[in-house]
Image (cartoon, rainbow, N blue to C red):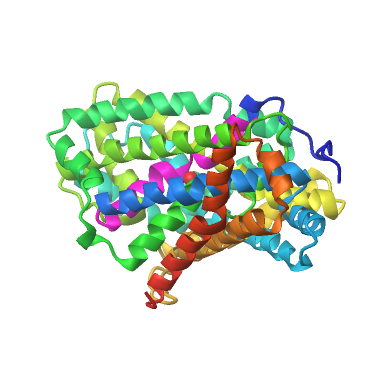
């Protein structure tokens, strides 16, 4: 393999395009929907600190590693692992890592799309003024009614999957790039506006304190695992999404600077969402541990009662849907790239195949909020099980393997060349984090959860 190897599937038009797309992948429901509710379920501040530490010490070095693997091989994650293992003289079995990533992408998207469907439905609710003047209990009733209907959830899930497939069909240089161009800045502005609203409630201090004052007695072993898993989830790591985006990255772009920018933006968006939501939670007497419905039961209260709330409500949910779309396309891209590059399929065929499988899998999540809500495996509904399996297990395991591969298996001269860090110290820091800190941390958290530690 030569260093000038071009990607078969196109290249981003610039560093900025990659930043937009990777940030688009990272920033999504994970930041705005999931981060607040899992923080609420796990007691607040202490959970947030563990999450931030994981982003810094595990997420960022692994994100650099994953981008690097993709860019070096310029192929889909499965072929990347085959090519790079070969280059390093390592075992062929590394390609299973690529397979696990593709599987994780399907599983995540299957429930991601259902929740993104909720956000889409809320665009319509906001448009028709459903939140106007409503109090917390009315807003909760709207949510409960909505998720109780499998037909409605199915409709919105189908619509969202269709939108995802339509964008992915157009390919990386047109579809993916254009889809995220306007989104990030607008979402950012809107979140700041929501924070401004939160400041006007009496519970602003209480909300901020909940988020930032750690009480470690509230944190369980599973809470630590969830925080770590979320660091992977929110940065789109451990399943090949960032790898496949890295494979479209031009050679002359600095991976480290770019990754810091993306991870920083992602973290700020999550924290802003938390600061916007928790004051409303406390001001309305709601439970921080309300679960996956949390943002749908809080933010509409704000939209229903603030000046200009109709406009901002519509805009907010539109933005949320777009943020979800720019993530969902990256969840399915590894599979599509593999089908196109290895199975001789057209992008259309590849999208139809992978989209249909995901759509079908999504039924499990839809039903777990209504007709199958009592059906539990290991004490979890299908949705909870999928979420646990992917975010808490598959992504960290994938990330662990990526760290080991980049830190130990690849030749140092190759990683050094690809990363092209500004100085030796930053390369060594990356190497220590990737070789020792990140894998050890993932391993210890796992041991802790199974009760060995
Ligand atoms: N990072 C996305 C979010 O926070 C979700 C995602 C996970 C996307 C894994 C791609 C891969 O919403």
- The one nearer the camera, 34 or 450, is 450
Q: Residue at x 87, y 51 (%)?
A: 344
Which residue: 40% across, 35% down?
A: 269
Q: Residue furthest left?
A: 202
Which image quadrant for residue 315? Answer: top left
Tell me the quarter of the picture where residue 289 sits: bottom left
Residue at the top extreme?
A: 308
Name the residue rendered at 28%, 30% in the picture.
195
Please check the rendered image and state whether residue 33 is part of the magenta-colored stretch, yes or no: yes
Relative height, residue 8 to residue 96 (above, below): above
Residue at 59 percent across and 42 percent down: it is 427
Q: Which residues are magenta?
A: 18-43
Q: Nearer the viewer, residue 265 or 382?
A: 265
> Residue 284: horizontal and vertical position, in percent?
17, 43
Residue most extreme to the front: 424
Q: Do we see residue 371 in this rendering?
A: no
Report whether 97 appears left or right of 313.
right
Percent position (x, y) of residue 84? 77, 54
Count the marks: how many? 0
State the image coordinates of residue 251 (x, y, percent, origin top left): 74, 32
On the rendered image, what quadrant is the C terminus found in?
bottom left
The vertical placement of 54 against 321, above or below, is below
- The answer to if 229 sits in the magenta stretch is no
Please state the horizontal and vertical placement of residue 159, each as a whole percent of the image. Answer: 57, 44
Most frequent secondary structure within the magenta stretch: helix
Q: Is residue 153 visible?
A: yes
In this orientation, which residue lies closer to the viewer: 285 or 215?
A: 215
Q: Quadrant of residue 79?
A: bottom right
Q: Is residue 168 shown left or right of residue 292?
A: right
């Amino acid at each position: 393999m030569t260093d000038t190897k071009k990607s078969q599937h196109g290249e981003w038009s610039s560093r900025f395009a990659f930043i937009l797309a990777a940030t688009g992948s990272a920033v999504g429901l994970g930041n705005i929907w999931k981060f607040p509710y899992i923080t609420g379920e796990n007691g607040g501040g202490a959970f947030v600190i563990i999450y931030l530490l994981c982003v810094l010490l595990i997420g960022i070095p692994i994100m650099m590693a994953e981008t690097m693997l993709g860019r070096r091989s310029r192929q889909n994650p499965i072929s990347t692992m085959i090519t790079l293992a070969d280059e390093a003289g390592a075992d062929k079995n590394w390609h299973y890592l690529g397979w696990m990533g593709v599987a994780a992408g399907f599983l995540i998207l299957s429930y991601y799309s259902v929740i993104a469907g909720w956000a889409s439905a809320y665009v319509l609710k906001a448009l028709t003024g459903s939140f106007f003047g409503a109090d917390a209990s009315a807003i909760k009733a709207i949510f409960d009614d909505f998720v109780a209907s499998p037909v409605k959830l199915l409709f919105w899930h189908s619509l969202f999957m269709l939108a995802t497939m339509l964008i992915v069909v157009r390919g990386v240089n047109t579809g993916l790039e254009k889809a995220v161009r306007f989104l990030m800045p607008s979402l950012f502005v809107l979140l700041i506006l929501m924070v401004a609203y939160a400041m006007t409630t009496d519970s602003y201090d209480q909300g901020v304190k909940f988020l930032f004052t750690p009480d470690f007695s509230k944190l369980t072993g599973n809470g630590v695992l969830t925080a770590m898993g979320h660091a992977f989830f929110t940065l789109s790591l451990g399943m090949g999404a960032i790898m496949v985006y890295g494979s479209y990255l031009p050679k002359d772009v600095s991976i480290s600077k770019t990754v810091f920018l993306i991870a920083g933006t992602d973290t700020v968006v999550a924290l802003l969402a938390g600061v916007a939501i928790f004051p409303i939670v406390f001001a309305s007497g709601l439970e921080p541990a309300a679960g996956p419905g949390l943002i749908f039961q809080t933010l509409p209260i704000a939209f229903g009662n603030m000046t200009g709330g109709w406009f901002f409500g519509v805009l907010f949910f539109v933005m949320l849907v777009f943020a979800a779309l720019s993530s969902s396309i990256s969840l399915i891209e590894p599979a599509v790239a593999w089908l196109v590059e290895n199975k001789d399929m057209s992008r259309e065929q590849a999208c139809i195949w992978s989209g249909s499988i995901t759509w079908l899998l999504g039924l499990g999540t839809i039903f777990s909020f209504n007709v199958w809500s009592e059906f539990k495996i290991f004490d979890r509904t299908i949705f909870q099980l999928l979420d646990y399996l992917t975010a808490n297990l598959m992504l960290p395991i994938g990330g662990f393997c990526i760290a080991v591969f980049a830190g130990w298996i690849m030749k140092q001269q190759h990683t050094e060349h690809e990363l092209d860090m500004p100085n030796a110290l930053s390369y060594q820091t990356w190497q220590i984090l990737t070789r020792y800190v990140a894998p050890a941390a993932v391993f210890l958290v796992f041991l802790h959860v199974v009760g060995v530690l």
